[in-house]
Image (spheres, rainbow, N blue to C red):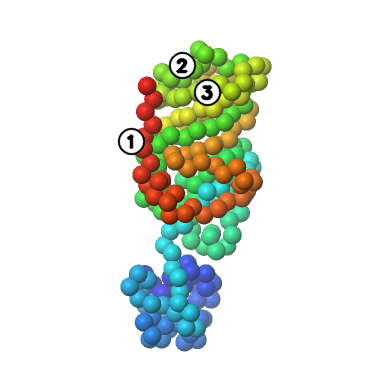
Amino acid sequence: MRIDKLLANSGFGSRKEVKKLLKSGQVKADGEVVKDPKTHVDPDSQEVTVQDAIVEYREFIYLVMNKPAGLLSATEDLSQETVVDILEPEDAMLEPFPVGRLDKDTEGLLLITNDGQLAHQLLSPKKHVPKTYFAEIAGCVTEEDIEAFKKGVTLDDDYLTKPAVLNILESDSTSKIELTITEGKFHQVKRMFEAVGKKVTYLKRLSMGPLTLDEDLEPGEYRELDEEEVEELRNAQALSID
């Protein structure tokens, strides 16, 4: 890894600021002064210091956010605010991205990381990692809907969804439900209810694989996952729906 990238990713400023730091002679690798920003170092086997303080480098970052309504699940947008825009600078500089998509008006659990391999694993259609949502529905959700979702429903593009678990919390003119799905088609939860003649009026993701939304995280707040949680995500198993 180039030493300027290492320092920039470790919080020592922009690439331009890091170059000035290197030229000042305050950066060392294994005790030797390094001034060339193109110099390659191995943070796992070499000791890099700035003003004799050891640089603690981390390659990956894993954040779980309680996404508020109104933000795009994207890294950047020319006209609208994204979930990455509200990250602290020291987190944003590691260039994390949201894993999967929550609609602009959807709230709840959103994993944000720069670990592409883990993201691919969690989103792979072959993995069937479960995702659970809470929703409010305009209309009375019935036992017939439970059976329909268990078999899979046909969306507006003729796609037949995989079996899903629908749990009715309240059933009235406005119903409250929890739904667990194992895939992530565009607007899938909304389209599944449209397929049975109902409309989602509020949607919040509660969990993804073993990761559950923290009750104490306010909308827009986030925290870093610990090593155990990351390992659980790596070992996320498919949900079997009989």
Instruction: Give the percent coordinates (x, y) of residue 31.
Output: 38, 85
Q: Are marks 3 and 1 in contact (CB under 8 Å)?
A: no
Residue pushed farthest top? 144
Q: Nearer the viewer, mark 3 or mark 1?
A: 3
Give the residue type that dot 1 points to: Lys
Distance Cα–Cα, label 3 vs label 1 = 25 Å
Q: Which residue lies under the disc numbered 2? A: 148
**CA distance for labels 2 and 1:** 23 Å
Residue 141, by quadrant, is top right
Secondary structure under tag 3 reads: strand
- Give the residue drawn at x 54%, y 59%: 92
* Label 2 residue SS: helix
The C terminus sits in image quarter: top left
Residue for point 36% across, 38% down? 237
The residue tagged 1 is 126
Residue that carries the numbered disc 3 in the rendered image:
167
Horizontal side of 228 relative to 71 (left or right) equals: left
Q: Earlier in the sequence, mark 2 or mark 3?
A: 2
Q: Position of residue 28 (x, y in %)?
A: 42, 83
Image height of 205 relative to 231, above or below: above
Q: Amino acid at mark 2?
A: Ala
**Residue 209's spot in the image, x, y percent?**
43, 39
Any part of residue 122 in sight: yes
Asked whether the beta carbons under mark 2 and mark 3 sit within 8 Å of each other, the answer is no
Q: Secondary structure at mark 1?
A: loop
* CA–CA distance in space, label 2 to label 3: 12 Å
Query: What residue lies at 55% left-to-right and 14% top-to-bottom?
Result: 142
Decide which of tag 3 and tag 1 comes sooner along the chain: 1
- Give, as a three-letter code, the residue at label 3: Asn
Q: Give the class, few, some or many, for how many residues have Cα within 10 Å of label 2's Cα (few <14, many ≥20).
A: some
Label count reads 3
